[in-house]
Amino acid sequence: MGENQKRWTVRDRYGNVIYLTEERWKHITDTMNHPEMVEYEEYLKKTIQIGRRRQEPLNPRKYRYQHFFDNLPDYSNAVVAIVLYGFDIKEDGTASSNNFVATAFFKHIMVKDQR
C-alpha cells in the first residue's frame, strides 16, 4: 500500500468510517500547507469523531468537519477537516464505503453571541 497506507481509521458520530492515509498526512503537514498541524493529529481524530459536519453545497461528496478547542496555536479556535466520501465496488459487485480525510487545518471561527 506504501504512500496510501492507512495511518488510522475512526468513526464519526453518525457511524461513518473515515480514514487518513500516510500520503494525506504528509500533504497536510508539508511546509507549504499546514505544518502547524503536526502536533495536533489527535485533535484531528477528535474533530472527525465528534465534530459538527456540513455537506459542501457544490460537491455532495465533500464534507467539512469542525470542532472547537481552547488551546490551539495563534488565534485559531477550531480544527477543520475536509473529508471526501465515496464507494469502492468489489469484484462481487457489492459496494463498500471509501471515506478519507483530504486535508485539515486550523481556523478562527466567530461564535455568535448566545445571550
Image: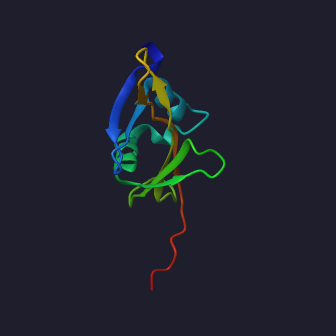
Outermost right residue: 58
**Pick the front one: 37 or 113:** 113
Q: State the image coordinates of residue 83 (x, y, percent, origin top left).
A: 50, 41
**Could you say which quadrant of the image residue 8 lies in?**
top left
Quadrant for the N terminus in the image? top left
Q: Is residue 20 left or right of residue 86?
A: left
Give above or below for 11 relative to 94: below
Outermost front residue: 93
Q: Residue at x 46, y 20 (%)?
A: 4
**Could you say which quadrant of the image residue 22 lies in?**
top left
Q: Residue at x 54, y 63 (%)?
A: 109
Q: State the image coordinates of residue 84 (x, y, percent, origin top left).
A: 52, 38
**Pick the front one: 26 or 47:** 47
Q: State the image coordinates of residue 89 (x, y, percent, origin top left).
A: 47, 22
Q: Residue at x 48, y 30 (%)?
A: 87
Q: How many marks do you count on the picture?
A: 0
**Pick the front one: 19 or 16:** 16
- State how the image is colored: rainbow
Outermost bottom residue: 115
Give above or below for 5 relative to 82: above
Give above or below for 92 relative to 83: above
Quadrant for the C terminus in the image? bottom left
Q: State the image coordinates of residue 9 (x, y, percent, origin top left).
A: 34, 33
Give above or below for 59 relative to 98: below
**Pick the front one: 13 or 104:** 13
Q: Residue at x 47, y 25 (%)?
A: 88
